[in-house]
Amino acid sequence: MGTRKRKAPPPAQARASMKKDLPEQFRDYRHVWVFMELERGHVHPVSFELLGEGRRLADQLGVQLAGIILGPPGDSTLHAAAEAFAYGADLVYLVEEPLLTDYRNESFTKALTDLVITHKPEILLLGATTLGRDLAGSVATTLLTGLTADCTGLDVDEDGSLAATRPTFGGSLLCTIYTLNCRPQMATVRPRVMRMPQRSNKPIGRVIRHDWRMLEEEIVTKVVGFLSDDRSGNANLAYADVVVAGGLGLSNAENLLLIKDLARTIGGDYGCSRPLVQKGWMPADRQIGQTGKTIRPKLYIAAGISGAVQHRVGVEGADLIVAINTDPHAPIFDFAHVGVVTDAVSFLPALTEAFTRRLALANRLRLVN
């Protein structure tokens, strides 16, 4: 007589069987919050992406979506509040204080923590930017709650718990993490992982001003200067419309000129897979993938990149993926929209020349007309 193999329970059931009753002090925590990252009057685009995702979660839970804004008094802070409503927020919690003009961990942590303790959200989302990662970890530690970092997916379980999915074991697996017995449930999401929602002309709704004060003498760190990203010299691949990237299939560092030439010809930016950074062929700010940048370009050309899951996580949101690889069984062909089985080193110059001719013809026709 054979032995029937017992099936493992579905993930939700397995998790639910481990769940304890939520402690009494957390049972009145409600609503979904999105921290609006505001720097020198500019809202980071990841905040709008998270409002779109937060809107979906709030609708599933039947609660409100709130934008959280910490900044100095002035028009730029109020404009950020208006933009939160335009991207889906039902209300805004606003802390206006001159000490919040520039990001400093101490002041922002205390302001956001005070806001959470007072108004009690069940879910708090932040962008996994340099600022967001620093703030999220500090706030979660202060509140003694759980934080899932660098999420690639967010959902709500049958009982209303946040299911936060992220890569693990070097990106070879995806795991879903729950914060069972603490609130708020916190998660960070990298820029470009979530789709940008449609902006609407929704009027400004309810703004709740939170009175919070702190003395400059209480803050250890001091701001001595400000260097904007556009002057830092670092790549901004996350928001490029066209990206060309190279991998080990290019054979040597000199052949990286081929992807740079193609990117320049078609008005795009260039990047690489992780092994090229590890070899020192390219700087880390050009790395694309799970441990690098997540991108959502209109066109992504991958030359000599095998397409392991670590890389796939960072590019699968692209509108059109063109893969060039000598191996017809390379994983990248499983998710690329167009696949070219050939040697990238010989193919890239021909592709660049073809684009050059086509663009020159288009320019001539435009001048004639």
Image (cartoon, rainbow, N blue to C red):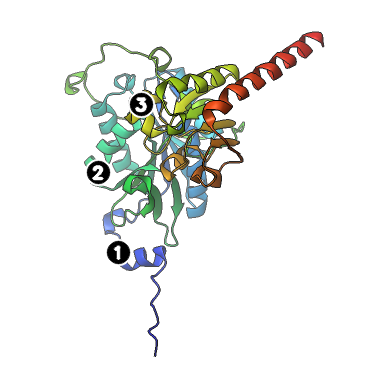
Please give the residue where the numbered disc 2 appears in the rendered image. Answer: 143
Residue 217, picture quadrant: top left
CB atoms of marks 3 and 2 within 8 Å:
no
- Circle 1 Cα neighbour tier, 10 Å, few/some/many (<14 / 14–19 / ≥20): few
- Residue 19 seen in render: yes
User: Quick check: 306 above or below 233?
Assistant: below
- The amino acid marked with disc number 3 is Ala
Instruction: Tell me where residue 28 appears, x and y as whole percent.
Output: 35, 53
Please give the residue where the numbered disc 1 appears in the rendered image. Answer: 21
Q: CA distance from mark 3 to mark 2?
A: 33 Å
Q: CA distance from mark 3 to mark 1?
A: 44 Å
Residue 202, picture quadrant: top right
- The amino acid marked with disc number 2 is Leu
- Label 2 secondary element: helix
Report the residue that reaches farthest toward the right: 369
- Label 1 secondary element: loop
Residue at (27% x, 42% y) in the render: 140
Name the side, left or right, on which 78 lies relative to 351.
left
- Circle 3 Cα neighbour tier, 10 Å, few/some/many (<14 / 14–19 / ≥20): many
Residue 133, picture quadrant: top left
Of residue 289 and residue 97, the one placed in the foreground of this image is 289
